[in-house]
Image (cartoon, rainbow, N blue to C red):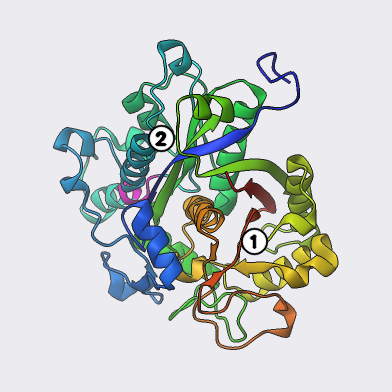
Amino acid sequence: MSARADAAGPRRVVVTGMGVVSALGLDAPAHWAALKAGVCGIGPLEIRDLDRLSVTIGGQAKGFVGEDRFARSQLSLYDRHTQFALTAAAEAWAQADPAPTQDEALRAAVVIGTALPGMQTLDDSYRAAFEEGKSRVHPFVVPRLMVSAPASHISMIHGLKGPAWSVSTACASANHAIGQAFHLVRSGAADLAVTGGAEAPLTFGAMKAWEGLRVMTRDVCRPFSKGRAGMAIAEGAGVFVLEERGRALARGATILGEIAGFGMSADAGDIVQPSADGAARAIAAALADGGLDVSEIAYVNAHGTGTAANDRTETAALRQVFGAHADGLSVSSTKSMHGHALGAAGALEFAAVLGALREGVIPPTINHLEADPECDLDVTPNTARARETPAALSNAFAFGGLNAVLALRRG
């Protein structure tokens, strides 16, 4: 433990700012309002060469136009995933208004999760070189497509000069990023951090690659439901400001929630097939890290991709950890509404958990048709439900068997 940690134990870490861009809305309030209302943001895509794709739906942040938000000189450096990250970070920063001192800025962290590089830049560059036969591509292709570009630009715009890096662990990227930022603040290595995830995979090349896996739905995403047919790829970003609780209270900041614990595990099994044991170990680790008993958890925002294997395996993992308490859990997959945003998925879901903690509303799993005996949990089908939520979990289980679970308390 850092020398800066409180003598009575690890420092407490709270969330004081939140920003979101998703298929449900272009800011955090719109995202949460749509989640409560059970709005489906998954629909027909508006991308180039759509007629060459078998899957033509996804969770697209329609209405997000980079040219309306950034100067031309900035756009030459920003792929769409960086544009999302900067927009969400600006919203989170404005809400938190952390006003770091010069010394604090030297220790302020930025940790952003992204599964893929700048896919729009990659697509455009390949088209230029191979389809159009051009001899040159844009001089900033490399800095635009870097996985770490969002973290770099956030640090530069907000003057944050402490540890800054990106995390790329497939669909667990955002949870791993938030968890690492949490550890930095809790240990005393930083007093505040900007963290979350960003992804922009809705390009012809990325969608064609995902088609090859044969895990994508062609109509709607219905996690945990009998008759579910797969996942729906999405884009977006969720970015949050984390602070040491004492610092936040001293300056009168609004606390959106508290991160209590973080758990990680590796399945060490199959590159694409999930493991109930690996997921269960991450869930148990998050509870232990946060000093939480299973009886304290009211809500679990599930990874819930809508594939047959994931939902069945996640159900088994929750029952393994919670035992008889699993029957009293409220579970939902908000991917049914905003889609699966890959490296940003955990961040969009983290925002949903913060809303549930603050307002006592469990967002639903929409498009649910019929209970599946292999997913025998209360999955909050189709309609949001009022429930006091003092503590909750947010699950992320990625290809490659990389698992990351966040445990949160009401602030």
Q: Secondary structure at mark 2?
A: helix
For the residue marked with disc 1, what is the amino acid? Val
For the residue marked with disc 2, what is the amino acid? Ala
Q: Report the residue at 70% width, 54% height from top.
A: 401
Specify the quadrant of the image occupied by residue 215: bottom right
Q: Secondary structure at mark 1?
A: strand
Front in this rendered view, residue 206 or 74 = 74
- Tell me where the magenta segment starts and ends, as one range: 118-122
Q: Is residue 1 above or below residue 361?
A: above
Work out how far the residue at label 2 is from the one at label 1, CA to CA, in angstroms. 26 Å
Q: Between tags 2 and 1, which lies in front?
A: 2
Residue at which label 2 appears: 96
Q: Is residue 27 above or below residue 78?
A: below
Figure quadrant of the N terminus: top right
The numbered mark at residue 300 is 1
Front in this rendered view, residue 216 or 263 = 263
